[in-house]
Image: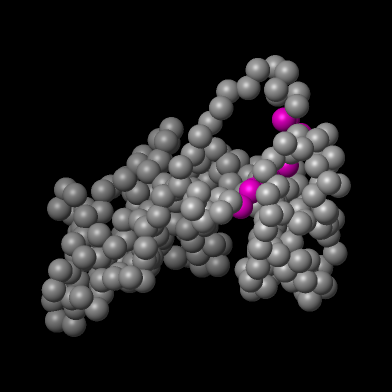
Amino acid sequence: MAPINYIIVGSGVFGASTALYLIRKYPKARICLVDRNAFSAPTRVAASWDWNKVVRADYNDIVYTKMALEARDLWKDDPLWNPFYHESGIYWISATGFAKQVLENFDKLGVKAELFSYPVEEARSHYAGIFKDADYTGIKEVLVNKTSGWADAKDVLQKVIETAVELGVEYIEAEVTSLAFEAGNGNCKGVITQTGETVVAERTILCTGAFTAKLLADSAPERTTLHAGDRIVAAAVAEAIAPLNSEQIKTFSSMPVAIQEVPAEKGQF
């Protein structure tokens, strides 16, 4: 059997998309995608395996804006991504001058979009007034971008993995417990699974999210330069899901993504 050219650990959004783009660019390469969850698992231990994710180019940083605009165009036009994208718009309540910065970034990049900054009283009337009772304390303007939206994260992630496999990526269900190193030079030569099997590859790509720091430390406790240290900081997001009755569904079915920044003492968003 041909040697493995790339082994990718983790089939979340980074692992799955890396596998897809590598096999598209190098169709003759042997690429293995390794994950603790089965290929057909109904759930995955991945932050990207979620009900939905926001697709937006609304950022303070113009570099992020440029990258996100390229991604948004793929969501809109690429047949792989398009079925999972919903251009609902975004309604962003911020007291930090965020709306002005976003408009400036779009202007500098020469991008035309249905992007607006509304004073609070005018903003309240948009989207059938579903945000009229929001907390606008300290708010002078509201950003509305009708070219932003959201994506079905779970379904599109599964589709990306399936597409990569169809193109030739090998999917391995295994728990990776350590990296494997060459005895002489200490270079990474692959991974070791929970069953003790060593999977050797020319290149090892870690797409392991919050598990990365532990994996590196466990793999080589004595090699502190290899450890993540403060280069990777794990964070968590609390999620709440509320059931809607038929009347509420009518009210909220066409709503945009809504983001409200709050004072630091209450959290971040």
User: At x 19% / y 49%, what residue is drawn?
Assistant: 194
| Residue at the farthest top position | 246
Q: Nearer the viewer, residue 33 or 132?
A: 132
Q: Judge from the rendering whether residue 197 lies leftward or rightward of residue 253; answer left or right.
A: left
Give the percent coordinates (x, y) of residue 160. Answer: 54, 49
Write down the region rendered in magenta. 252-261
Give the percent coordinates (x, y) of residue 168. Answer: 47, 54
Q: Judge from the rendering whether residue 204 lies leftward or rightward of residue 140; answer left or right.
A: left
* Figure check: 59 above or below 151: below
* Figure check: 106 above or below 245: below
Whether 254 is among the magenta residues is yes
Classify residue 207 by image quadrant.
bottom left
Give the percent coordinates (x, y) of residue 158. Answer: 51, 42
Q: Nearer the viewer, residue 91 or 174?
A: 91
| Residue at the farthest front position | 137
Whether 60 is among the magenta residues is no
Classify residue 188 by image quadrant.
bottom left
Q: Nearer the viewer, residue 177 or 245?
A: 245
Q: Judge from the rendering whether residue 18 lies leftward or rightward of residue 113; answer left or right.
A: left
Q: Nearer the viewer, residue 7 or 63?
A: 63
User: At x 76% / y 56%, what residue is drawn?
Assistant: 140
